[in-house]
């Protein structure tokens, strides 16, 4: 999936004053929302593993979000652009107990 980061993104407000940067928690939220929509997963998350923020995301960046379901409760995500890797990690979900 491709995401174009607009220059007027609400999350730039106050983060940071000298230069606008997409907060890491926003990238994480985008990954979680897309994983849940794509794979039909439901909260809660059991954990976030090997979370790495490699490069800041600036206004006007075109991101590619890669999602891969590695097992029934785990989704690996990665944000990349022509600049390289921006963020990656694993989302681990709680599976509902059988009734």
Image (tube, rainbow, N blue to C red):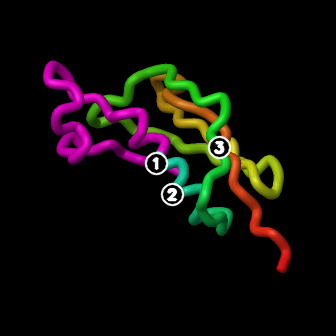
Q: Residue at x 76, y 62 (%)?
A: 95
Measured in 3D between alpha carbons, the distance from the residue under mark 3 to the one under mark 2, in whole angstroms, is 15 Å
- Asked whether 72 or 79 is in front, the reply is 72
Labels in figure, total: 3
Q: Is disc 1 surrounded by few (<14), some (14 to 19) or many (20+) residues within 10 Å?
A: few
| Quadrant containing the C terminus in the rendered view | bottom right
State which tag comes first along the sequence, 1 or 3.
1
Is 95 included in the stretch rendered in magenta?
no
Image position, residue 76 (x, y; %): 69, 42
Q: Quadrant of residue 85?
A: top right
**Residues drawn in magenta:** 1-28
On screen, residue 13 versus residue 4, left or right, reads: left
- Asked whether 48 or 2 is in front, the reply is 48
Image position, residue 8 (x, y; %): 18, 44
Prevailing secondary structure of the magenta residues: loop
Numbered tag placed on residue 47 in the rendering? 3
Q: Residue at x 65, y 68 (%)?
A: 40
Are circles 2 and 1 on residues that touch, CB within 8 Å?
yes
On screen, residue 84 versus residue 6, left or right, reads: right
Q: Tell me: residue 66, above or below residue 51.
A: below
Q: Residue at x 27, y 34 (%)?
A: 59
Are circles 1 and 3 on residues that touch, CB within 8 Å?
no
Q: Which residue is mark 1?
A: 29
Numbered tag placed on residue 33 in the rendering? 2
Image position, residue 90 (x, y; %): 67, 39
- Asked whether 61 or 96 is in front, the reply is 96
Q: Tell me: residue 70, above or below residue 61.
A: below
């Amino acid at each position: 999936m491709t995401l174009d980061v607009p220059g007027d993104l609400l999350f730039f407000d106050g983060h940071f004053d000298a230069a606008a940067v997409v907060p890491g928690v926003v990238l994480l939220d985008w990954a979680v929302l897309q994983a849940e929509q794509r794979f039909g997963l439901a909260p809660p998350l059991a954990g976030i593993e090997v979370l790495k923020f490699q490069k800041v995301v600036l206004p006007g960046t075109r991101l590619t979000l890669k999602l891969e379901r590695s097992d029934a409760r785990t989704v690996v995500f990665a944000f990349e652009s022509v600049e390289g890797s921006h963020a990656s990690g694993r989302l681990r979900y709680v599976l509902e107990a059988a009734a």
